């Protein structure tokens, strides 16, 4: 076999491997394919390890994709399928056959598949959903329990109107960037000089001021049994707010924490909600607030609370664990964010007294408490959040 | 004297080791490809695992200039790319006005010349250097904001900076670019797509010992082994911030400053603040893990 043929076969293999990765949900475009072929040309292919890490460096974009890549690599390159098997492997991956040829995917890889698969911009379809079904858990069952009614056009327009009017109790903050402004406090030297040259010597001072922008928003939303009635509305709210402004991160929790920011980022609310329905595994179950806040603090707080984020906690505070360990975690959460707002949608009585252990544990660490007496629509939700009464307490004492 | 670029992964490994960095094969492969394919190397990982060090070692062992851009919130073009020297420009205008010889046209052309330009890291990394293209380290990219990331996208795809008043500056040979991130926020996919990605993980015991012996050669071998064993054990604990390699090195130096030849209970307690930086972690370890860590280290004697 000539060198030409060898590299041709290699290119074909890499192409098929890229297809496999793409089907599994990694964002692999044609540009990366070319880089991968280029990369394999400059390394010693007899060392499998080098080949692994070379392809890894090209195809993997985030740490969470590593495990998925490992499984795909093992299946494609190490199990050494024959030429015609390679072609069928890609198809086999996409067919909804229940008889998996390889070993059952570990749970975390299955999770990663969901995350990566849904993160890609490809529209969701039957095939895509089916490969995410691993032997360990059933996606269909969860889909059934989270079958959101699709949004009517009236609902959609109403939502847009509400979102346009919504004012969260979060003032915009001065950023460190400047924009030209006629009565700004600072002199914009660059444009002043430019206009001076243009005006042939007469000094014309231009001014600038700080750009003001929303701080990042992190939403932690309870989706346990007691909150079930509000799930659809909450998700519509979260979807709208995610698409309305930048730097919004959304987490749903019942007994475990799920980051759904990427799933909610799809502009179509129905597709976004369907994706969330797939990604979350603990709909309408119990609540472990302490444990989930703890896992947020460990795994996410440094990644999403970095730039002075405001945290919006939506929960009824009814905790299955009776509030054990909750106070410590709430304290840490409050200390690591700019401001902690608690929206409690289940307080139907005006004479609120914190009886449940969970509520007692949360309350001392909240900067802004927003009980809602009746919550039937997005308008109520927006009103509850938009009340200006608590702005006095800004910033935190 | 500038060295030539490594031609194989093994040469890259030797190059990094020669510079005092102990890489694992995955990192070496990514670094080699980055040099070979002239693509930016995107390093992500927890604080203190040696991301910045890679760029420093690359620059030193290749004999290239290291241009470092430390990112922070609000980093803008005037502090990252270039700025006009306004006082000098003003002066030039005043001088031009006082003398009659210069007409206005030539003045406006002159005050936007190279001599009035203040170069910042990104621009200076594109300029040719006697030692070859420099190593551009864009450190802690996650600290800056999205607008700057978008700007960087343009610079890194074309290796070109356009200055409206002057024209564009293009690198003849692209610099070696190393980007690091502590993952305090997600970097946009568009930027990552142009880079070779590598997650820098905590090293295993063997590699950590090699790093420690390279960095603190004066430490007794038994102390180094104990420290590494204890740190490896602590990383398995449920901690808010597990200690990085930087902490391991600091801890060894701290123990040596206290004239410790062995890691004993007293020394461990006294120096806990060197490796753990959160009160919760410290009290957690004090209560539960101290005995275990000591047991692990004594078995490594």
Image: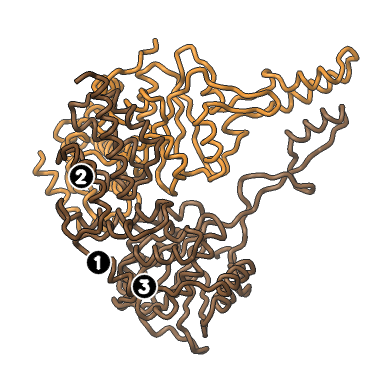
- Chain letter of the residue carrying label 3: A
Q: Residue at x 67, y 48 (%)?
A: A210
Q: Dot 1: within a 10 Å radius of its alpha carbon, few (fewer than 14), some, or many (20 or more) residues? A: few
Q: Secondary structure at mark 1?
A: loop
Query: Percent from the top left, x then y, of residue A187?
Result: 75, 40
Q: Secondary structure at mark 2?
A: helix
- Residue at numbered disc 1: A138
In space, the residues marked 3 and 2 are separated at their CA atoms by 43 Å
- Chain letter of the residue carrying label 2: B
Q: How many marks?
A: 3
Query: Percent from the top left, x then y, of residue A80?
Result: 15, 38
- Residue at numbered disc 3: A146
Query: Percent from the top left, x then y, of residue A107?
Result: 22, 58
Q: How is the image coloured?
A: by chain
On screen, A133 above or below B101? below
Q: Report the front residue among A33 and B161.
A: A33
Q: Dot 2: within a 10 Å radius of its alpha carbon, few (fewer than 14), some, or many (20 or more) residues? A: many
Q: Secondary structure at mark 3?
A: loop
- Residue at numbered disc 2: B232
Q: Is residue B17 visible?
A: no
């Amino acid at each position: 076999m000539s060198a030409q043929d060898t590299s041709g076969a290699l290119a074909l293999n890499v192409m098929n491997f890229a297809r496999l990765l793409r089907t599994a949900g990694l964002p692999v475009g044609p540009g990366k394919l070319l880089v991968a072929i280029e990369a394999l040309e400059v390394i010693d292919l007899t060392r499998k390890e080098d080949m692994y890490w070379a392809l890894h460096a090209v195809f993997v974009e985030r740490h969470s994709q590593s495990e998925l890549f490992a499984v795909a690599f093992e299946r494609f390159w190490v199990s050494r399928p024959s030429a015609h098997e390679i072609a069928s492997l890609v198809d086999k991956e996409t067919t909804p056959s229940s008889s998996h040829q390889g070993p059952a995917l570990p749970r975390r890889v299955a999770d990663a598949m969901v995350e990566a698969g849904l993160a890609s911009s490809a529209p969701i379809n039957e095939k895509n959903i089916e490969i995410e079904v691993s032997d360990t858990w059933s996606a269909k069952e969860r889909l059934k329990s989270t079958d959101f009614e699709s949004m009517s056009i009236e609902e959609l327009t109403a939502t847009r109107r509400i979102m346009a009017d919504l004012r969260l109790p979060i003032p915009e903050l001065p950023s460190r960037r400047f924009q030209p402004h006629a009565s700004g406090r600072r002199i914009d030297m660059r444009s002043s000089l430019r206009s001076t040259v243009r005006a042939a010597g007469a000094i014309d001072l231009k001014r600038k001021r700080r750009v003001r922008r929303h701080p990042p928003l992190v939403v932690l939303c309870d989706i346990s049994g007691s909150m079930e009635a509000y799930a659809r509305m909450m998700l519509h709210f979260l979807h709208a707010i995610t698409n309305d402004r930048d730097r919004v991160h959304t987490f749903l929790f019942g007994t475990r924490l799920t980051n759904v920011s990427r799933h909610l980022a799809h502009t179509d609310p129905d597709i976004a909600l369907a994706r969330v329905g797939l990604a979350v595994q603990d709909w309408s179950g119990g609540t472990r607030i302490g444990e989930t806040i703890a896992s947020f603090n460990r795994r996410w707080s440094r990644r999403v609370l970095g730039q002075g984020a405001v945290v919006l906690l939506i929960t009824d505070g009814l905790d299955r664990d009776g509030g054990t360990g909750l106070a410590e975690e709430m304290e840490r959460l409050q200390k690591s964010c700019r401001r902690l707002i608690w929206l409690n949608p289940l307080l139907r009585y005006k004479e609120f007294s914190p009886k449940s252990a969970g509520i007692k544990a949360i309350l001392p660490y909240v900067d802004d408490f927003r009980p809602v007496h009746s919550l039937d629509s997005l308008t109520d939700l927006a009103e509850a959040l938009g009340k200006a009464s608590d702005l006095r307490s800004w910033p935190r004492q | 004297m500038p060295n030539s670029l490594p031609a194989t992964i093994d040469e890259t490994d030797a190059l990094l080791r020669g510079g005092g960095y102990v890489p694992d094969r995955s990192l070496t492969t990514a670094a080699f490809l980055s040099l070979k394919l002239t693509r930016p190397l995107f390093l992500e990982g927890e604080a203190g695992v040696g991301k910045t060090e890679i760029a420093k070692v690359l620059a030193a062992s290749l004999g290239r200039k290291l241009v470092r851009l430390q990112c922070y919130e609000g980093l803008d073009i005037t502090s990252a790319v270039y700025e006009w020297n306004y006082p000098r420009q003003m002066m030039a205008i005043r001088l031009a006005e006082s003398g009659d010889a210069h007409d206005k046209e030539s003045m406006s052309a002159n005050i936007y010349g190279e001599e009035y330009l203040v170069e910042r890291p990104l621009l200076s990394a594109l300029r040719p250097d006697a030692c070859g293209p420099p190593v551009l380290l864009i450190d802690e990219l996650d600290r800056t904001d999205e607008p700057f990331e978008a700007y960087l996208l343009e610079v890194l795809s074309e290796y070109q900076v356009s200055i409206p008043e002057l024209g564009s500056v293009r690198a003849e040979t692209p610099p070696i670019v190393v980007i690091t991130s502590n993952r305090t926020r997600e970097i946009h996919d568009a930027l990552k797509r142009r880079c070779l990605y590598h997650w820098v993980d905590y090293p295993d015991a063997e590699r950590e010992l090699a790093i420690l012996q390279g960095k603190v050669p004066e430490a007794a071998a038994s102390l180094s082994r104990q420290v590494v064993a204890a740190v490896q054990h602590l990383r398995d604990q449920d901690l808010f911030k597990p200690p990085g390699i930087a902490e391991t090195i600091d801890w060894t130096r701290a123990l040596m400053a206290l004239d410790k030849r062995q890691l004993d209970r007293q020394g461990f307690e006294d120096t806990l603040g060197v490796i753990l930086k959160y009160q919760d972690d410290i009290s957690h370890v004090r209560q539960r893990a101290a005995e275990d860590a000591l047991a692990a280290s004594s078995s490594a004697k």
